[in-house]
Amino acid sequence: MRYVWAAMTAATFLLGSAAPATVSAAPNEDSGLSIGIGIVCNTSEQMHRLVGLRMDGAEVPRAVKAVNIEARDPRACGVAAVAFMSDKMIDIKAVQGKMVQIVRISVVAAYDGRHWSRVPAMTQYALIDPEGYAI
């Protein structure tokens, strides 16, 4: 992926959880920016595939690995801590009894475990908790 990877502790937390890998982060109403940690993918097709694998019972690490192998890109999907603006809801799905939205986002900054860095705006696809922003 074209972003800086999240802190290892965040990755460990997310990859080990049974949830669909969304972590709530309230949006800043003034700027429209949100900050979150979760799974992001390069394309909506990759995110749909990942969600489908999760719906079939695959754990997050296995689902991410399968999507990356199919995409022939080891960074097609992965865990990231990013600052982003939601762009458009693509789909809504139920994963393990919880509703999640697949949303197109515009990433503007990334966290590498020590520092936030601005990145050129890039389109990614994330899972958003309908109760609040999350990635």
Image: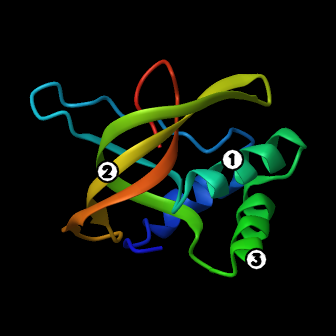
Give the residue pinned by disc 1: 48
Q: Is residue 33 visible?
A: yes
Using the image as rendered, state which of residue 110 and residue 75 is in the foreground.
Answer: 75
Name the residue rendered at 34%, 71% in the picture: 112
Q: Residues within 10 Å of mark 3 (few under 14, many from 20)?
A: few
Specify which label sits upstream in the sequence, 3 or 1.
1
Three-letter amino acid code at disc 2? Ser
Image: 48 above or below 93: below
Specify which label sits upstream in the sequence, 1 or 2.
1
What SS does tag 1 mark?
helix
Name the residue rendered at 79%, 68% in the picture: 66
Q: Is residue 77 rendered to the left or right of residue 113?
A: right
- Number of dots carrying numbers: 3
Q: Could you tell me residue 94's position as x and y percent?
A: 73, 26
Image: 68 above or below 121: below
Q: Could you tell me residue 91's position as x and y percent?
A: 60, 31
Q: Could you tell me residue 24's position as x and y percent?
A: 44, 33
Give the residue pinned by disc 3: 69
**Which numbered tag is attached to residue 106?**
2
What SS does tag 2 mark?
strand
Q: CA distance from mark 3 to mark 2?
A: 25 Å
Three-letter amino acid code at disc 1? His
What is the residue that sits farthest to the top in this orientation? 131
Q: CA distance from mark 3 to mark 1?
A: 15 Å
Three-letter amino acid code at disc 3? Ile
